[in-house]
Image (cartoon, helix red, strand yellow):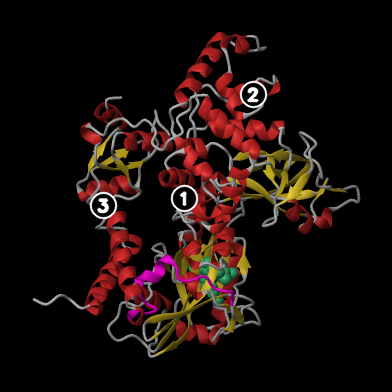
């Protein structure tokens, strides 16, 4: 048999990858591991690179992002993207139904009731079944061409699954980010010293505007489709029929969309959803109610800005209005000055909020937020409260504009603005606030994991002057600690034992703990893997750093600058002299026993371990941790309130173990 041609091999790989994409993102029943998927993708990309003439815009390889682009062209929509009227209570929804029944000859109307996804509206063009263009809503008449970024959205099919596709289909939908992916993104950003996004919608909008699709690909954006614009070569009678067809083509349609007969059924769904939405993986801000029959939609027509056949019901917002009493400046471990609002305590979705983030100096200036203002507090993806705006109309004239400090409020050093962002940083070398944050970060579990180095201890060590630089931690003596006020013998002993134990963590975790901008846990591992020991890393210049895969020019520059700094060099030298392990691997236990080579999925709440801790134990024992259950999973470790992953494991016959069984198995 002759060897298959590159063309054939490419075709097979594309078909396989498309299938696995669908299984993973749409059906949620993956059949292969992430690693196997990546391998196939790498094979395809290598073949496409060797045979550029065989590249096609709908190849799944575009999911990992093509070349960076210069900007976004503004392009008119074939049909305008209108907005919808909002309603806020059941009476207004009934009024909508009464109005509509006067316009269409139906006594009882069938409505589609859909979750209103809190993301970014998008219009996608498929020509002869191939995805050719995607535009943001823009001003409704014309939007930005974000095609290159949209190609990286994992559940957006680059080709419709259909033998004879219509000439033109324009689908409308929403790009969004799941709450768990949003939290992950923000954790990564925090670890790397980058500013956090306020909520999943903002991070979705920001991601779509990235100029580098490869970066966008990492943001784990997703899609729901819920409507259409221009159609050629196909027609639908009802909205639900259109959605069903979209689903068959492989487009993701929200599974919670229901057909209601008459407005009473709509109202019943509304009251059900007010609570249910909390259990979704993504944010919703209401329900959209749409006339199902498309011919009747024509009869209903439009106002100047919105169709008369649809209305949005907005959930009571998770917002509260309260007094902004004062603004504090917090100094972070990278010296970043963050304004934090002190509020008159207020109830917000079940908790009392008295402090909230004000993001940065630009935000305060742009929104003209003053001390003494009544401000609107919101919860971002139900995580951290933040202030969204001030109610300017309620001003009395006594409000005071906030003057952002020009000196660090803690050490008095000058502050300077990042060249590449809105963040102001303390430039002081000896800032106590920075040192405290650094010490906390250094001792954190993901870094050097120093037991006994809690917040209180850090305060004491720094305030007493015992620790002026990170290496001083390793110079502490029992009698010094015991001489401190409020310091018990046990805490002193614990700390010293914790400090001693941390010496052997290895280069990656040491680097992760240093609070270098753009160097979080993952990047630290990459660096340690590439340079193996501290001396080699210290000798590396910007070129050598940026030649490492995963270290872009921005990171390389910031890291090189950090390494060139003589104070930092002294710190690193001190660590080495004080006996810390500065070579690559940490002390791993030999991978023996029941965990070696096994794949684990952890789900639900555990009693004894947090996520990071359990993952580290599994890895230390030679096992792997995966985020999703498939036939390849060896164990699902299920804690309390385990949900869909547990169900999936049971369906697939994967072995489920309790926390106690895990402890036994691991010999802990
Ligand atoms: S229908 C003309 N359906 O809500 C009607 N919109 O203010 C077109 N949205 O801009 C929109 N989920 O970004 C529709 N299931 C859904 C939706 C939805 C979210 C957004 C969309 C639109 C805004 C309406």
Mark nearer the N terminus (1 vs 2): 1
Residue stretch in magenta: 54-72
Q: In which quarter of the view is residue 368 placed?
A: bottom right
| Residue 277 visible in image | no
For discs 2 and 3, the disc positioned in front in the rendered view: 2
Among the two numbered marks 3 and 1 on one chain, the one whose residue lies closer to the N terminus: 1
Cβ of mark 3 under 8 A from ligand 1: no
Is residue 64 on the magenta stretch?
A: yes
**Residue 402: within the magenta?**
no
Label 2, ligand 1: CB separation under 8 Å:
no
Query: What residue is drawn where x is 59% and y is 53%?
Result: 557
Give the left or right position of residue 333, taking residue 237 as reference: right
Percent of width and height locating residue 5 = 20, 78
User: Residue 348, labelled with which disc?
Assistant: none
Residue marked by disc 3: 630
Label 3 sits on a secondary structure element that is: loop
Task: Specify the label residue 180 is tagged with.
Answer: 1
Between marks 1 and 2, how big is the CA–CA gap?
A: 37 Å
Q: Nearer the viewer, residue 597 or 500?
A: 500
Asked if residue 135 is positioned above or below residue 221 in the image, the reply reads below
């Amino acid at each position: 048999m002759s060897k298959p041609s590159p063309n054939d091999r490419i075709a097979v790989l594309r078909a396989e990858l498309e299938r696995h994409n669908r299984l993973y993102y749409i059906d949620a029943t993956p059949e292969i591991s992430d690693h196997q998927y990546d391998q196939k993708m790498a094979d395809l990309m290598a073949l496409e690179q060797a045979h550029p003439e065989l590249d096609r815009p709908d190849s799944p390889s575009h999911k990992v992002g093509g070349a960076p682009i210069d900007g976004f062209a503004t392009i008119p929509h074939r049909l305008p993207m209108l907005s919808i009227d909002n309603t806020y209570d059941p009476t207004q929804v009934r009024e909508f139904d009464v109005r509509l029944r006067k316009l269409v000859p139906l006594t009882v109307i069938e409505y589609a009731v859909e979750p209103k996804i809190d993301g970014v509206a998008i219009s996608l063009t498929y020509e002869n079944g191939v995805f050719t263009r995607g535009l943001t809503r823009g001003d409704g008449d014309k939007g930005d061409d974000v095609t290159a970024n949209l190609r990286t959205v994992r559940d957006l099919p680059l080709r419709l699954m259909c033998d004879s596709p219509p000439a033109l289909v324009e689908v409308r939908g929403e790009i969004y980010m799941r709450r768990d992916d949003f939290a992950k993104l923000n954790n990564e950003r925090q670890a790397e010293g980058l500013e956090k996004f306020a909520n999943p919608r903002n991070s979705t909008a920001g991601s779509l505007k990235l100029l580098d699709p490869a970066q966008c690909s990492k943001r784990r954006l997703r899609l729901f489709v819920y409507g259409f614009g221009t159609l050629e070569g196909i027609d639908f009678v009802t909205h639900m029929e259109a959605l069903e067809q979209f689903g068959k083509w492989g487009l993701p349609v929200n599974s919670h969309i229901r057909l209601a007969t008459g407005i009473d059924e709509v109202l019943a769904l509304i009251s059900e959803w007010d609570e249910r939405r909390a259990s979704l993986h993504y944010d919703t801000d209401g329900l959209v109610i749409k006339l199902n029959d498309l011919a009747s939609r024509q009869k209903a027509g439009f106002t100047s800005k919105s169709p008369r056949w649809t209305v949005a019901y907005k959930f009571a917002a998770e917002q509260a209005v309260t007094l902004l009493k004062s603004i504090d400046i917090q100094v972070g471990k990278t010296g970043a000055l963050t304004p934090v609002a002190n509020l008159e305590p207020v109830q917000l979705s079940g908790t009392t909020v008295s402090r909230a983030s004000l993001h940065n100096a630009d935000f305060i200036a742009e929104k003209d937020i003053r001390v003494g203002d009544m401000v609107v507090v919101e919860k971002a993806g139900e995580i951290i409260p933040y202030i969204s705006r001030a109610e300017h109309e309620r001003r009395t004239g006594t409000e005071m504009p906030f003057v952002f400090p020009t000196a660090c409020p803690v050490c008095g050093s000058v502050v300077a603005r990042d060249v590449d962002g809105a963040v102001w940083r303390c430039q002081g070398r000896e800032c106590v606030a920075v040192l405290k944050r650094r010490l906390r970060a250094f001792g954190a579990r993901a870094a050097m994991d120093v037991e006994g180095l809690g917040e209180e201890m850090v305060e004491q060590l720094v305030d007493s002057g015992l620790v002026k630089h990170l290496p001083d931690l390793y110079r502490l003596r029992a009698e010094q600690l015991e001489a401190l006020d409020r310091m018990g013998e046990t805490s002193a002993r614990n700390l010293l034992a914790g400090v001693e134990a941390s010496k052997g963590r290895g280069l990656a975790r040491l680097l992760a703990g240093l609070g270098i901008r753009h160097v979080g846990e993952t990047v630290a591992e990459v660096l340690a893997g590439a340079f193996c020991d501290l001396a080699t890393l210290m000798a590396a210049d910007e070129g050598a750093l940026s030649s490492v895969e995963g270290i872009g020019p921005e990171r390389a520059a910031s890291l090189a600058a950090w390494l060139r700094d003589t104070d930092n060099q002294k710190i690193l030298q001190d660590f080495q002299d004080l006996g810390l392990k500065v070579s690559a691997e940490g002390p791993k236990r030999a991978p023996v026993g029941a965990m070696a080579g096994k794949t684990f999925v952890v789900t639900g709440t555990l009693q004894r371990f947090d996520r990071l801790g359990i993952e580290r134990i599994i890895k230390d024992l030679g096992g792997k941790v995966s985020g999703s259950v498939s036939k390849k999973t060896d164990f699902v470790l299920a804690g309390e309130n385990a949900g869909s992953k547990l169900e999936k494991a049971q369906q697939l016959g994967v072995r489920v173990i309790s926390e106690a069984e895990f402890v036994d198995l691991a010999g802990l």
